[in-house]
Image (tube, helix red, strand yellow):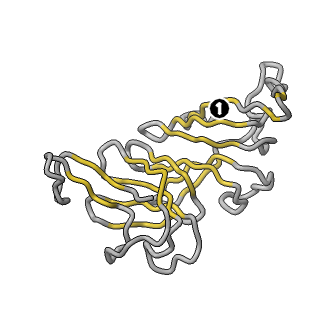
């Protein structure tokens, strides 16, 4: 699977119908990727394209995978961001949101579950978004994150039962169990007050 970019104007070879297509998932030296690439996301102005790839030859010294890559259309540069898969990029191109089970992305991550993170990729600053209403870790996994244009609002799904609270200060609800599984719910995070 390849990651392709289609735009109306540019320097890529024309398809003959006024459009141009460029393959983004290639190594810096132009060689073919040796693994599949998928799940692309593009910034609002089309400058940054982010995707997940199982190839280990897109950049030098990449011995693991899958990884996330950011392609800059202005510089034609490709940047690897390790330990991040299936992310979404904000419209301004500044933030990435993604889910991960890794316990070394932020301090105190010991729940062993998939959490939602927001990464300011140019500075490397990262925060965990999916935290309980009292600041504790969640008691269920989270995923399917998507982000607003400015990177401040994040929507995601979770099976956790301690993300939000009632006015009495107790957990808002207990997830119903259906067909042996826990029901996942949709949540919205706002960075202006750091709340879900």
Quadrant including the C terminus? top right
Using the rendered view, name the quadrant where residue 161 is placed. Answer: top right
Could you say whether the residue bearing mark 1 is in a helix, strand or loop?
loop
At x 35%, y 53%, the residue is 48
Q: Position of residue 94 (x, y in %)?
A: 42, 50
Q: Point out the residue furthest to the bottom here.
A: 61
Q: Which of 167 and 34 lies nearest the eye of the viewer?
A: 34
- Count neighbours of disc 1 (C-alpha within 10 A) and say few if under 14, some if 14 to 19, many if 20 or more: some
Q: Which of 89 and 144 lies nearest the eye of the viewer?
A: 144
Q: Is residue 195 left or right of residue 123?
A: right
* Residue at numbered disc 1: 196
Q: Position of residue 71 (x, y in %)?
A: 37, 60
Q: Position of residue 7 (x, y in %)?
A: 24, 47
Q: Is residue 23 left or right of residue 189?
A: left
In the displayed structure, would residue 35 be above or below residue 98? below
Q: Is residue 191 left or right of residue 178?
A: left
Q: Is residue 99 left or right of residue 178?
A: left
In the displayed structure, would residue 193 be above or below residue 16? above
At x 51%, y 73%, the residue is 56
Using the rendered view, name the quadrant where residue 135 is placed. Answer: top right
Quadrant including the N terminus? bottom left
At x 54%, y 47%, the residue is 97
């Amino acid at each position: 699977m390849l990651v392709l970019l289609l735009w109306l104007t540019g320097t890529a070879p024309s398809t003959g119908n006024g459009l141009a297509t460029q393959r983004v998932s290639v190594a810096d030296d132009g060689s073919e990727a040796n693994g599949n690439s998928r799940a692309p996301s593009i910034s609002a102005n089309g400058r940054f394209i982010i995707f997940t790839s199982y190839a280990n030859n897109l950049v030098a010294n990449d011995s693991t995978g899958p990884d996330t890559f950011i392609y800059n259309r202005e510089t034609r540069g490709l940047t690897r961001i390790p330990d991040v898969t299936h992310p979404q990029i904000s419209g301004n191109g500044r933030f990435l949101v993604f889910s991960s089970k890794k316990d070394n992305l932020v301090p105190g991550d010991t729940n062993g579950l998939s959490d939602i993170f927001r990464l300011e990729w140019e500075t490397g600053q990262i925060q965990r978004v999916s935290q309980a209403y009292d600041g504790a870790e969640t008691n269920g996994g989270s995923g399917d994150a998507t982000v607003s244009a400015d990177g401040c609002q994040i929507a995601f799904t979770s099976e956790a039962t301690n993300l939000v609270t009632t006015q009495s200060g107790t957990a808002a609800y207990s997830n119903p169990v259906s067909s042996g599984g826990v029901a996942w719910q949709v949540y919205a995070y706002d960075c202006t007050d750091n709340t879900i």
